[in-house]
Image: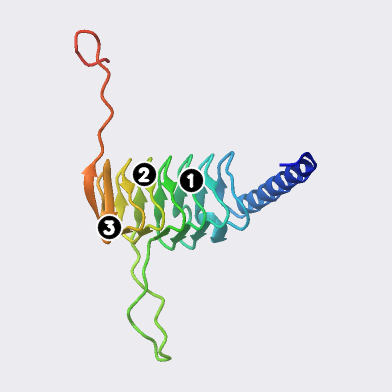
């Protein structure tokens, strides 16, 4: 990078930071709960601000978006979460995402679906079922994953790229496929022992 471009880059970062602060202040005044050190880019939220709870140090890359049209605090995002480009979280009922979750690019997570019924004009009725979605702490969701209504994913599990999650997944597994199924269990950290071999307190 040439030295003459550095001031422009610094100015751009400052503008983005000021824009981010203004958006966060506006959402907080409208009823959203946004923690400290949250990083967002552009228009990252749509819907009812009172529905949003965004934990501290959460990061949403450019074009990642949260939509929440449910009741107060119905979209809860934990601390130190990460949403890569193009991730879309769409909540009408209840979505809870734990601390330390990483969501890959172009993922889609929703707590509702659409009805099969048509109205008198031949248009599909936008009135499907709604069921809560829960994603445990430190889950890693790979690129292009789709997580559907009513799903619970256990802590520390990994969902492979391109998977469609339609049923619950236990903690500490790697799951892949459409529908996603566990293909292996993750090794748990070894517990500390003292010299006698007894478990450390």
Instruction: Answer left or right for 7 relative to 170.
Output: right
Say whether marks 2 and 3 touch (CB < 8 Å): no
Q: Residue tagged by mark 1?
A: 82
Q: Name the disc covering residue 53, or none.
A: none
Q: Which image quadrant for residue 49?
A: bottom right
Determine the residue positioned at 34% across, 61% down. 148
Image label count:
3
Quadrant of the rendering where the N terminus is positioned? top right
Give the camera-side residue of 71 and 59: 59
Of circles 1 and 3, the one toward us is 3
Q: Secondary structure at mark 1?
A: strand
Residue furthest front as drawn: 2
Query: Residue 27, how many percent across, how many down?
Result: 61, 53
Q: Earlier in the sequence, mark 2 or mark 3?
A: 2
Of tags 2 and 3, the one toward the viewer is 3
Q: Is residue 193 above or below residue 6?
A: above
Label 1: how many Cα within 10 Å (few below 14, some 14–19, many 20+)? many
Q: Which residue is located at x 52 percent, y 43 percent?
A: 58
Q: Write the residue at 77% across / 46% down.
A: 8
The span from disc 1 to disc 2 (Cα, nearest Å) is 11 Å
Residue where numbered disc 2 is placed: 139
Nearer the N terminus, badge 1 or badge 3?
Answer: 1
Crowd rating for badge 2 (residues with CA inside 10 Å; few <14, some 14–19, many 20+): many
């Amino acid at each position: 990078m040439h030295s003459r471009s550095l001031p422009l880059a610094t100015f751009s970062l400052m503008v983005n930071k000021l824009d981010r602060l203004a958006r966060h202040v506006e959402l907080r005044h409208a009823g959203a709960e946004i923690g400290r050190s949250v990083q967002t880019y552009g228009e990252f939220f749509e819907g009812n601000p009172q529905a949003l709870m965004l934990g501290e140090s959460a990061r949403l890359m450019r074009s990642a978006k949260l939509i929440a049209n449910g009741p107060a605090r119905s979209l809860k995002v934990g601390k130190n979460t990460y949403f890569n480009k193009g991730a879309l979280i769409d909540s009408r009922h209840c979505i809870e995402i734990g601390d330390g979750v990483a969501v890959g690019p172009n993922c889609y997570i929703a707590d509702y679906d659409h009805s099969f019924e048509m109205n008198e004009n031949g248009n599909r009725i936008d009135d499907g079922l709604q069921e809560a979605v829960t994603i445990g702490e430190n889950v890693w969701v790979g690129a292009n994953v789709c997580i559907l209504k009513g799903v619970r994913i256990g802590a520390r599990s990994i969902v492979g790229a391109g998977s469609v999650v339609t049923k619950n997944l236990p903690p500490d597994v790697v799951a892949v496929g459409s529908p996603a199924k566990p293909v292996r269990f993750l090794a748990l950290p070894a517990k500390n022992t003292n010299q006698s071999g007894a478990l450390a307190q």
